Image: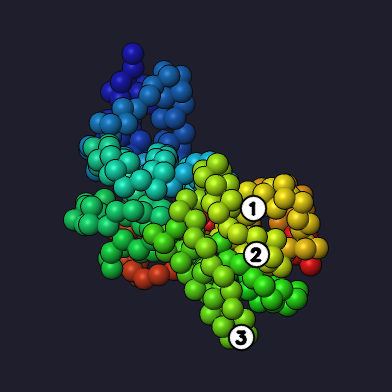
Amino acid sequence: MSNIRDIAERAGVSIATVSRYLNGTGYVSEKTKKRIQQEIEKAGYTPNALARAIFTKNSRTIALMIPNITNPFFNQMATVIEDYTNKMGYSLFLCNTEDNREKELECLEVLKSYRVSGIIASRSQCKEEYEGIKIPVISFENHISPSVITVSSDNYNGGRIAFNHLYDTGCRKILHIKGPHNFEATELRCKGFVDAAYEKGVNVDVVEFETDFQVQILEEYLERIKNIEKYDGIFVFNDIAAAVTLKYLKGKGVKVPEEVQLIGFDDSFIGELLYPALTTIRQPIKEIGTLLIELLIKQINGEKVEVRDYLIKTELIKRESTL
Ligand code: XLF
């Protein structure tokens, strides 16, 4: 089996040059790069990633912790992030935390032991565990600490847009199905929605769901809402829960949007597949994913980045579930 010395000999360069090429740590001319790469391919040489990680103190791996891979929003986000991570010369580790603190802690330990270069924590259920961690961290949605950047959609304004749309289309008996209280994003959506209703002098009912992805549990929550058909407008905290609500309403013979108008949040791909297609508030997944990676890689490279909240604009995507 060939090693780095053989590659260097065959390419007619020093071991240090091959090492610089493999680790991306210094200048190597384009001509030399090409020669080294040709020899690597001819020899079928696979660089030892672990040894390289120890040597360069950069494993060129980024970990994405997502709350659940079955929610279409998060699987779209993971796809965008993986693509962009690879484009930037890194590989992605995916961890599915299921909003479970214990699972997130276990993942964190594994990631530390693998010396990942950076971590994207989304909807984190841990805070102090990230303190003092030597790995650059960035957060999506839930705040971790004042020294960690948080990227999120403008959820508050998204909630306001959702209310104003239902109001403008004539709804006055309105229900908001809100997300779990430990999701900062859905708390803000709820606040925006309720504030906008207050400004218009409309009372809205609010019920809380304690999960966002286990379909069966979502259905059980819906069963508990008395006379759901008495509402003429419902805003559901995300698209997957809105899809379950739509199915439930149809099952009860309620016509959407003629009798009840329905609006979700995310603009994940399922919205368009539903019948009627779901009106929703768009979280720009691509923009969020690329910003997370850009800010994280800057931190990995030791560049200065402003530690603050980065808010991405939300907008209404009008489809058939509202008038
Ligand atoms: O955490 C929130 C709730 O669900 C997240 O942005 C989502 O909308 C994804 O579906």
Q: Which residue is mark 2?
A: 234
Image location of residue 218, percent across then percent down: 55, 48
Pick whichever, 114 or 211, lies toward us. 211
- Cα–Cα gap, marks 1 and 3: 26 Å
Q: Which residue is mark 1?
A: 245
Q: Marks 2 and 3: CB-CB under 8 Å? A: no
Question: What kind of residue is marked 1?
Answer: Thr
Image location of residue 157, percent across then percent down: 55, 74
* Helix, strand or loop status at disc 1: helix
Which of the two labelled residues, at mark 1 and mark 2, occupies the earlier sequence position? 2
Query: Left or right: where does residue 139 sit relative to residue 274?
Result: left
Q: How packed is label 1: few (under 14 Cα within 10 Å), some, or many (20 or more)?
A: many
* Residue that appears at 41% across and 24% down: 40
Image location of residue 272, percent across then percent down: 72, 51
Q: Is residue 25 visible?
A: no
Q: Marks 1 and 3: CB-CB under 8 Å? A: no
- Cα–Cα gap, marks 1 and 2: 9 Å
- Cα–Cα gap, marks 2 and 3: 17 Å
Q: Which residue is mark 3?
A: 201
* Residue that appears at 64% across and 70% down: 174
Q: Looking at the rendering, which quadrant does residue 110 occupy?
A: top left
Query: Left or right: where does residue 6 sit relative to residue 213?
Result: left
Pick whichever, 253 or 88, lies toward us. 253
Q: Residue furthest left?
A: 132
Query: Left or right: where does residue 24 sit relative to residue 156?
Result: left
Q: Residue furthest top?
A: 1
Image location of residue 260, percent across then percent down: 73, 63
Which of the two labelled residues, at mark 2 and mark 3, occupies the earlier sequence position? 3
Q: Marks 1 and 2: CB-CB under 8 Å? A: yes
Question: What kind of residue is marked 3?
Answer: Gly
